Image (spheres, helix red, strand yellow):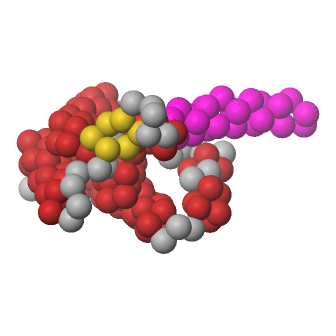
């Protein structure tokens, strides 16, 4: 029996992202109005309404599933590993979703002193394992959407992906190279 890839559910995943985003925006609408987040939390700076999340989050989901499809198409792994690969994708997504949700909860309970260290956890982990997977970005964004809407988590997530890529792909490799030369 051939296992279906997550990529076969691209439309379903995108629609699920739209539904989740719509639920958050509707909740905000009925509980005080849809929030506009301003750059650097300064009302004098330009802001982005959470209404934009209805476009950005489903678009992000579509793009991320497309990246996963490209990765799977370029993979030389046999078909029997598809189930294992799907499990790994879901696992990475859920871990990032949990991290984003935890950050949202910490923000809502005004625990910024803990949050400032927790946001660096992916960068520290990147020195040991690869964490700049596309599915991690989607999970992180959906987890943070509760507190930050559909724009800021994408920006923060992309910056974190860049930092984790640099930590894993550049700094870690340089350290491993220097250690191997020192021997």
Which image quadrant for residue 78? top left
Which image quadrant for residue 171? top right
Residue 23 seen from this side: no
**Residue at the (15%, 63%) spot, across then down:** 30
* Rendered view: 144 above or below 110: above
The range drawn in magenta is: 158-183
The front one of 172 and 102 is 102
Q: Quadrant of the C terminus?
A: top right
Residue 182 seen from this side: yes
- Magenta stretch: helix, strand or loop mostly: helix
Q: In the current view of this chain or complex, which residue is farthest to the bottom?
A: 109
Is 112 left, or right, of 74 in this rendering? right
Q: Quadrant of the N terminus?
A: bottom left
**Residue at the (45%, 34%) spot, across then down:** 44
**Residue at the (69%, 37%) spot, across then down:** 172
Which image quadrant for residue 94? bottom left
* Rendered view: 75 above or below 34: above
The front one of 179 and 112 is 112
Residue 46 x %, y %: 39, 30
Residue 127 x %, y %: 66, 45
């Amino acid at each position: 029996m051939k296992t279906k890839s997550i990529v076969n559910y691209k439309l379903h995943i995108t629609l699920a992202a739209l539904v989740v985003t719509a639920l958050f925006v509707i909740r905000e609408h009925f509980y005080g109005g849809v929030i506009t987040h301003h750059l650097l939390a300064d009302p004098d700076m330009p802001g982005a309404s959470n209404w934009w999340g209805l476009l950005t989050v489903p678009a992000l989901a579509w793009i991320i599933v497309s990246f996963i499809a490209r990765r799977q198409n370029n993979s030389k792994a046999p078909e029997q590993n598809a189930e294992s690969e799907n499990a790994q994708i879901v696992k990475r997504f859920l871990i990032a979703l949990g991290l984003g949700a935890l950050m949202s909860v910490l923000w809502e309970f005004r625990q910024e002193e803990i949050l400032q260290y927790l946001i660096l956890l992916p960068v520290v982990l990147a020195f040991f394992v690869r964490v700049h997977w596309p599915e991690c970005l989607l999970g992180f964004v959906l987890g943070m959407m509760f507190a930050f809407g559909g724009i800021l988590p994408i920006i923060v997530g992309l910056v974190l992906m860049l930092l984790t890529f640099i930590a894993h792909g550049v700094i870690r490799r340089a350290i491993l190279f220097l250690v191997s030369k020192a021997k």
